Every structure is written in C-alpha cells, then in structure tokens.
Image: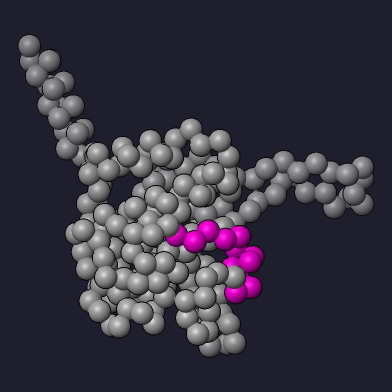
Amino acid sequence: MKKILALLLLLAGGVAFADESVDVCYNYGCNQEATVRFSDRQLRTLAKRLRSLPSPAEERKTLAEVIGQMYSWAGQQSPVYADKGGNAFDDEVNGAMDCIDHSTTTTRFLKMLERRGLLKYHVVADVERRRRFFLFDHFSAVVQEFPRPVRASAVDHGTAEKSKTHQYVIDSWFVDNGESAVVLPLEDWMNGAGPKVEPNY
C-alpha cells in the first residue's frame, strides 16, 4: 500500500511539473520581462502538432505557427498582446516588442520545445544580427537543420563536402502578436529579405 501511495505521489508530482514557465521580453531592448506559464494541456497540443512531421520544411512551417500560438497564449498573461508587427505601429504602448525582445523570447520558446524533444529536424542556434547601411540593426532567432549528406560529383576536384547545413530565421518581429512567425533562409534574411513593415526594412 505504501508503494502504491508513493507511486501516486510521484505521478502527481510529475503532472504538477508538466507545466513550464518562460520569461517574455517587452518594452524594447528586453527592458521588462514577464513570466508566462504554458500548461500541460497547451504543451501537449504543441507536441501533437510537431510530432510525426514528414520533412524539415514541414517542421519549419509548423514551428512558425507554433511560435505564433505561444505568443498568443503569452499575450493572455502579459502586456505583449498589444504588440504589432515592426516598431512603427506599436505607438509606444505597454507590451510593445522590438527585434531584441522578439529574438530573445522566440529563442527561449524554441529552446523550451527543443528541451522537450519536439524538434526532429532542427537544433536551436544563436541569435543572429543583420546590419544595413551601417546603422539599422535587426536580430532574429535561428534554427539549424541537421546536416544532410551531399552527393559528390565524380571527383569534384577534391572539394566535395561530406555534409551541408542550412540555417533559417524564425522571425516573429515582422507580425502582430499571435500570427505565424516569418521563416526565411538565413542568407536571404541577411540580404534584407522579409515583409516590409518598417521604412528601412
């Protein structure tokens, strides 16, 4: 009887710790943070969407949607519900997020999903920065696709790679709270690709 009771307590403890908290940045430059909690039910919903995806491309597409959903849930617990795409349309409201807030928070969301074993084709990389005209900085969260074998043509002059890696930005700064993040190859993003939501972007 004692063993059964101990097992029940252990299981109850596991359920209690199934929820997970993440700090969300807002009001520009991660000036303020709010701790938001994702329930076990919410996390199970995300897990169901991310499991059994057939390809890296499908995982990235689903990740964009999942990140949007996580921001929507975060907006139910914090001022970030007021955030609009870019910076120009926030009108300095409480809860507005710049690209530093987004890149930091989105990376935290992605790392939480990674810790829970929900990324099959990607690993979370460091935040990347692009600079345009030596003045305008922009930051984004990044994922890296697992290396894939590359077929070498004949001899290929001895320069054939054994594997090739691809990195992609998961950029939630471009969209309003709750919308799917923008996914782009890192190289394209570095060259200025992305929705035009600001005069200089």
Q: Is residue 85 left or right of residue 159?
A: left
Q: Horizontal and vertical percent for residue 35?
A: 22, 60
Image point (36%, 42%), residue name? 46
User: Is residue 31 visible to us here?
Assistant: no
Residue 185: say if magenta.
yes
Q: Which of the 4 image quarters holds residue 34? A: bottom left
Image point (12%, 15%), residue name? 4
Q: Horizontal and vertical percent for residue 193?
A: 59, 70
Q: Horizontal and vertical percent for residue 102?
A: 39, 67
Residue placed most toward the observer, 60 or 24: 60
Instruction: Decide: is 169 above or below 32.
Output: above
Q: Is residue 71 left or right of residue 165?
A: left
Image point (83%, 49%), residue name? 160
Q: Which of the 4 image quarters holds residue 9? A: top left
Q: Horizontal and vertical percent for residue 1?
A: 7, 11
Residue reaching furthest to the top = 1
Residue 31: say if magenta.
no
Q: Which of the 4 image quarters holds residue 133? A: bottom right
Image point (21%, 58%), residue name? 76
Instruction: Decide: is 148 above or below 110.
Output: above
User: Is residue 37 visible to us here?
Assistant: yes
Q: Is residue 14 left or right of residue 133?
A: left
Residue placed most toward the observer, 83 or 31: 83
The number of numbered discs placed on residues in the rendered structure image is: 0
Chain part drawn in magenta: 181-192
